[in-house]
Amino acid sequence: MKVLVVGSGGREHAICMSVAKSSKVEKIYCAPGNAGIGQIAECVPIGAMEFDKLVSFAKEKEIDFTIVGMDDPLVGGIVDVFEAEGLKVFGPRKNAAILEGSKAFSKDLMKKYNIPTAGYENFTDPQKALEYIETAKMPIVLKADGLALGKGVLICNTKEEAIEGVATIMQDKKFGDAGNTMVIEEFMTGREVSVLSFVDGKTIQIMSSAQDHKRAGDGDTGLNTGGMGTFSPSPFYTKEVDEFCKKYIYQATVDAMAAEGREFKGVIFFGLMLTEDGPKVLEYNARFGDPEAQVVLPRMKNDIIDVMEACVDGTLDQIQLEFEDNAAVCVVLASDGYPVSYEKGFEISGFDKFDNENYFCFHAGTALNEAGKIVTNGGRVLGVTAKGTDLKDARAKAYAATDWISFKNKYMRHDIGKAIDEA
Ligand code: AMP
Ligand code: GLY
């Protein structure tokens, strides 16, 4: 079969790598892809938001199955556009992708269906938000309702910061229309865990857990980024946590969406916080995490096409999801200066030792230059993943593998997976 993957990051490279392992697949296209994806798929220069062009391409090439990796096209309704043309596509429709696309929607859903999350209020009027802040307990969390590249969340320690935050989100519109509505949420403390799942509208199957490192600097300092590294599984995701989440969060979310007439098919990514009062949902995403996919998918034993087709066909109950009994760590190699400003265009070397069995080099911001060399082309450049017998082994191997790669201004965190030592 012929598969089209939509997206261009490390997550899409990990998806393409899994798709390439499927015995059912003879050809992979990726739009727009990147230099690494180009080694296993044919990259086509169509943007992820160019739905009409993507549909025409899929028809022309007789694509059997399309996989959408990114949030923007999902929230924008790409799945509805493909389905209307009779094309088979993996991902939630627009009315279900709202689970990620609107934080106000997802908070209201959780409240209505008693799914554990932080207390909150939604605001469309900045004056009302300011009045609320007057008597609220600090710290407090302000969230732009819509998609904001993972940056629309402000944690405010004082009333002054919160007042400034309301101006940033709702008045200065730093995150654009995403800030037309704002959620003000109670501040929670605890460890964060990312749990990805496959969903077919009724049935949900949980993948192995992971943990991201969102801040740019060692010791969780510096600005928020798209993610500087991950490990899987999380040792803090215990059997008790799993049981609690199965009872109160996972199926409850799928059932709530179905009850609202918003049947969810695709990947639900649960951002959880393990608080003193038990696990609570921080956020939902309607897709694989990046760089969570880079540690979860290499450990999945199933043929990814079988699982994804079962999600679309509503037969996920017949699939037994299986993960290797090992661990993986991904260290992101970024351009120095990310996430603020950085230079691009530097040649990258050292790819030959990655065997795509135990060591993976997932490309994110890379491109081919005119001379056909692979060069840096973004903030997050590569995700170096290694598998090991356990987390410590995987971490040692991943960091050893980061040394194989050279490019000018290479930057990484040195403490990815440090939390493992406390487990
Ligand atoms: P989100 O995009 O909603 O996942 O938020 C981004 C990050 O902000 C999360 O990964 C948390 O580290 C932090 N965060 C979000 N909501 C809260 C909260 N209610 N309490 C504490 N931290 C939060
Ligand atoms: N790693 C966090 C995300 O993909 O949203």
Image (cartoon, rainbow, N blue to C red):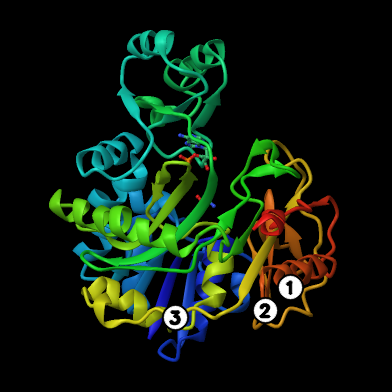
Residue 43 visible (yes or no): no
Q: Is mark 1 within 8 Å of ligand 2?
A: no
Given residues 144 and 38, the one toward you in this image is 144
Amino acid beneath label 2: Thr
Which residue does the image show at 66% across and 66% down from the upper left? Answer: 329
Could you tell me how far apart the alpha carbons at marks 1 and 2 are, in whole angstroms? 6 Å
CA neighbours of label 3 inside 10 A, class few (<14), some (14 to 19), many (20+): some
Residue 357 x %, y %: 65, 83
Amino acid beneath label 3: Glu
Q: Is mark 3 within 8 Å of ligand 2?
A: no
Residue 322: mark = 3
Q: Quickly name the residue at label 1.
A: 393
Quarter holding residue 181: top left
Image marks 1 and 2: residues in contact by CB distance under 8 Å: yes
The number of numbered badges drawn on the structure is 3
Could you tell me how far apart the alpha carbons at marks 2 and 3 are, in whole angstroms? 16 Å
Indicate the secondary structure of the residue bearing disc 1: helix
- Lower sequence index among marks 3 and 1: 3
Which residue does the image show at 17% across and 56% down from the upper left? Answer: 258
Amino acid beneath label 1: Asp
Residue 156 x %, y %: 54, 22
Q: Quickly name the residue at label 2.
A: 389
Quarter holding residue 332: bottom right
Could you tell me how far apart the alpha carbons at marks 3 and 1 are, in whole angstroms? 21 Å
Given residues 94 and 182, the one toward you in this image is 182
Indicate the secondary structure of the residue bearing disc 2: loop
